[in-house]
């Protein structure tokens, strides 16, 4: 079975984790700092705070802004639940803006329509690794005095049109990455938050570790080296050194991962060009996506086959697929809690009805890629 995504682990990764197991520190040790510094080096951000997973990162990123109980935030319905859940965790009402029908990212024009006096936060999501139009989103934020957290769970290694890397926070207060096994690099589970704001960094450090600090500049008193203070209600969202060692090793292969993913995408795009019922993803000029997903649009109605049938027929040929994503506002929790209903965001809903994610990961051989292409052409062509 060729799954839609899969981690890439080599001997160097295994040796990195084993070296930690043989060391004195399994958590809160030197590899966490080393991993964070490497992310800063790659992205260009000043500060990085690693966390146990990207959802934790989103949670404390919103918490660090201290937006209050009457605030609203805007994000996309075409994302995993964590993007908007992070607002709910912090008593911020999630509001959605529809997506661009070409990029599948949040549409800045629709964001502007949903800004009210209660809006305090924007969480654009770089879907499938393609950066959002951050220049336009940043302009909206500046106009209305809004904060921005980039959800870059899919986008480590991706580059904006100006060539700079996602995560440098030139357009935002913070950026959050995910290192789940199907993402571009993995730490097993894990995430990170980057920022250029030292005060936000200190808040993130406290919030990931029970709200405590030993920073002498922040303590109200300091009777000795054992002393710490809980200055906020925080969480245990720390990353272990085993995860950080794996992540550091994986970061050394980031260029290879990106190159291989883009090679596979190019092969798919060439093979599927001109297919009657299938639309391939679009990458704007000068933007460089790391392509976490290969999300195609299939007109199942015109094809005369349901998505379930197509997925099963592909599975029968050893090809695994997935759907990304069920629009968040259609989930029962969001309907029951906030009154959202089907039809509220028609572009995202139409996109969802036709979406299918095909296999894409660097461990795929050329033969695997050809097998996917052959199967898709036989079943959808």
Image (cartoon, rainbow, N blue to C red):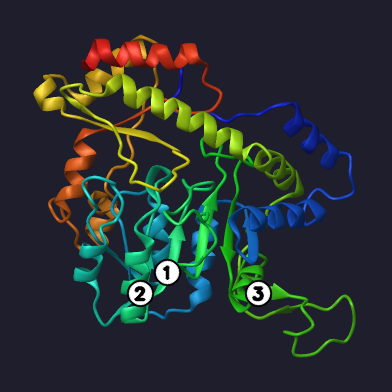
Q: Mark 2 or mark 1: name the one nearer the start of the chain.
A: 2
Q: Secondary structure at mark 2?
A: helix
User: Residue 91 appears in which quarter of the rendering?
Assistant: bottom left
- Is residue 277 visible in the rendered structure shown here? yes
Residue on which disc 1 sits? 148
The mark closer to the camera, 1 or 3, is 1
Residue on which disc 2 sits? 141
User: CA gap, disc 2 to disc 1?
Assistant: 7 Å
User: CA gap, disc 1 to disc 3?
Assistant: 18 Å
| Mark 2 and mark 1 residues within 8 Å of each other at the beta carbon | yes
| Mark 3 and mark 2 residues within 8 Å of each other at the beta carbon | no
Q: Secondary structure at mark 3?
A: helix
Tell me which residue sits at (66%, 68%) in the image: 205
Q: Mark 1 or mark 3: name the one nearer the start of the chain.
A: 1
Residue on which disc 3 sits? 202
Tell me which residue sits at (37%, 70%) in the image: 138
Image coords of residue 53 (percent x, y): 57, 51
Callout 2: few (<14), some (14-19), or many (20+) C-alpha neighbours within 10 Å? many
Quadrant for the C terminus in the image? top left
Residue 314 horizontal side relative to residue 169, left or right: left
């Amino acid at each position: 079975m060729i799954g839609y995504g899969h981690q890439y682990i080599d001997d160097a990764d295994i040796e990195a984790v084993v070296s930690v197991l043989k060391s004195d520190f399994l958590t809160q040790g030197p590899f966490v700092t080393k991993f964070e510094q490497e992310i800063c080096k790659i992205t260009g951000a000043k500060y990085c705070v690693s966390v146990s997973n990207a959802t934790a990162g989103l949670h404390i990123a919103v918490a660090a802004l201290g937006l209050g109980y009457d605030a609203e935030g805007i994000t996309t319905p075409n994302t995993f639940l964590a993007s908007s859940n992070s607002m709910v965790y912090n008593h911020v009402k999630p509001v959605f803006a529809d997506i661009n029908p070409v990029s599948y990212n949040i549409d800045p024009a629709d964001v502007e329509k949903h800004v009210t006096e209660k809006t305090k936060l924007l969480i654009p999501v770089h879907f499938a690794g393609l950066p959002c139009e951050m220049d336009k989103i940043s302009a909206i934020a500046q106009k209305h005095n809004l904060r921005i957290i980039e959800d870059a769970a899919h986008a480590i290694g991706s580059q904006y049109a100006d060539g700079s890397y996602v995560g440098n926070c030139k357009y935002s207060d913070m950026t959050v990455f995910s290192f789940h096994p199907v993402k571009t690099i993995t730490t097993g589970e894990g995430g990170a938050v980057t920022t250029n704001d030292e005060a936000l960094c200190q808040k993130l450090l406290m919030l990931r570790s029970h709200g405590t600090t030993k920073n002498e500049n922040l303590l109200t008193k300091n009777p000795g080296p054992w002393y710490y203070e809980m200055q906020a209600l925080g969480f245990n969202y720390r990353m272990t050194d085993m995860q950080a060692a794996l992540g550091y090793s994986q970061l050394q292969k980031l260029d290879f991962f990106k190159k291989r993913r883009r090679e596979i995408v190019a092969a798919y795009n060439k093979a599927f060009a001109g297919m009657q019922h299938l639309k391939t993803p679009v990458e704007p000029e000068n933007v460089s996506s790391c392509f976490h997903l290969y999300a195609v649009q299939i007109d199942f109605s015109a094809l005369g086959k349901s998505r379930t049938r197509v997925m099963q027929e592909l599975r029968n040929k050893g090809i695994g697929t997935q759907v990304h994503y069920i629009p968040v506002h259609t989930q029962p929790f969001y309907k029951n809690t906030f009154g959202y209903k089907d039809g509220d965001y028609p572009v995202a809903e139409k996109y969802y009805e036709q979406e299918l994610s095909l296999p894409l990961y660097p461990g795929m051989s050329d033969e695997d890629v050809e097998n996917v292409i052959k199967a898709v052409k036989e079943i959808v062509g």
